[in-house]
């Protein structure tokens, strides 16, 4: 379970006059995401969705508030005063840089993240991209849990096949279409068998038809993982209302900047879903009405 409590993120910036100002990207967001659910973070550009996702991943520390995954703290808020800074340094000085690297810097949470720009290594083939990710995860294992080289290769080939890329194993990312590169990023994330996948606008760079195919592919893979093991939790950032409603068990709507939790909309339509399902369409229209209300302060719906 992911638990976000009173998350705020403040960025200090220097304006054109050289004076210090600040930007609050996320303001007092509290959110609980149960295991095995697909949840979309939806909102206008600049509302802090991606910042909040990076805080969930531990890529950024919150200015205030905490994120716990399965009861474990992801990152502490950054120190705001001199007293807090001294205490922070004492806690994290630990034994030595080497000891910190061995003990403190190990991943504490079973998370994979997929970025909008694919984030695959262009100098590696599709197969090499997966093997590299598996080697990194394998480095933290010990004893019988540690996989051999042949097992890593076998696993990489398996997940390329799961995402329809088996025939392209020896192709470089530049030789793949945008949709294929995004499937490669998905294959790499799935190959390390995480409990949680965080996705930041993963399908934004492809055409509408490919986007729908990738959405269906994601749902198929999510259902397959649930059938053979612990359910996979997916948190997805998107600007696309249709995508959010079609994919998700719940849509979390962010307000315009600074990002606050605007509304939480459950999507109780049965799976598999049809994009033309009247229940799906009604939820999409309700969410669009929320956006319209925020822009024009008027809506035909009661919010």
Image (spheres, rainbow, N blue to C red):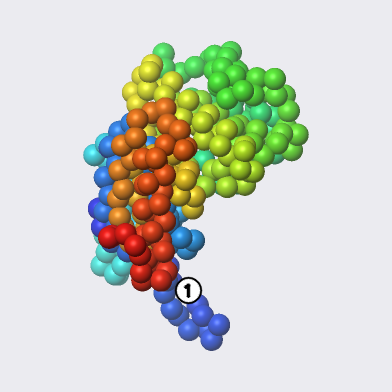
Q: Position of residue 246 (x, y in %)?
A: 44, 39
- The answer to whether 55 is drawn above or below residue 108 in the figure is below
Q: Secondary structure at mark 1?
A: strand
Nearer to us in this view, 135 or 130: 130
The C terminus lies in quadrant: bottom left
Point 35% across, 30% down: residue: 270
Nearer to us in this view, 144 or 15: 15
Nearer to us in this view, 247 or 292: 292
Whether residue 100 is visible here, answered yes or no, is no
Point 60% across, 32% down: residue: 184
Point 62% across, 38% down: residue: 209
- The answer to whether 148 is drawn above or below residue 88 in the figure is above
Q: Position of residue 144 (x, y in %)?
A: 41, 13
Residue 173 in which image quadrant: top right
Q: Position of residue 11 (x, y in %)?
A: 42, 68
Residue that numbered label 1 is attached to: 13
- The answer to whether 303 is drawn above or below residue 67 in the figure is below
């Amino acid at each position: 379970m992911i638990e976000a409590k009173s998350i705020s993120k403040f960025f200090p910036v220097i304006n054109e006059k050289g004076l210090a100002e600040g930007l609050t990207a996320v303001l007092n967001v509290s959110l609980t995401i149960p295991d095995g659910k697909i949840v979309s973070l939806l909102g206008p550009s600049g509302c802090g969705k991606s910042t909040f996702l990076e805080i969930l991943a531990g890529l950024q520390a919150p200015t205030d508030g905490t994120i716990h995954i399965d009861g474990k703290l992801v990152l502490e808020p950054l120190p705001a005063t001199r007293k807090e800074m001294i205490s922070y340094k004492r806690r994290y000085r630990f034994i030595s840089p080497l000891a910190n690297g061995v003990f403190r810097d190990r991943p504490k949470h079973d998370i994979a993240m997929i970025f909008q720009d694919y984030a695959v290594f262009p100098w590696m083939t599709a197969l090499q991209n997966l093997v590299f990710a598996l080697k990194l995860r394998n480095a933290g294992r010990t004893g019988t849990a540690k996989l051999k080289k042949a097992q890593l290769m076998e696993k990489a080939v398996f997940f390329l096949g799961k995402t329809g890329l088996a025939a392209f194993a020896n192709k470089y990312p530049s030789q793949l279409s945008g949709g294929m590169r995004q499937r490669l990023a998905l294959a790499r994330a799935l190959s390390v068998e995480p409990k949680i996948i965080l996705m930041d606008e993963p399908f934004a760079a492809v055409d509408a038809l490919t986007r729908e195919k990738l959405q269906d592919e994601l749902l198929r893979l999510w259902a397959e993982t649930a059938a053979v093991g612990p359910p996979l939790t997916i948190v997805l950032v998107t600007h696309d209302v249709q995508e959010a409603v079609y994919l998700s068990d719940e849509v979390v709507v962010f307000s315009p900047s600074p990002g606050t939790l605007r509304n939480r909309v459950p999507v109780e339509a049965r799976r598999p879903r049809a994009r033309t399902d009247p229940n799906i369409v009604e939820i999409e229209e309700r969410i669009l009405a929320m956006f319209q209300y925020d822009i024009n302060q008027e809506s035909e719906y009661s919010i």
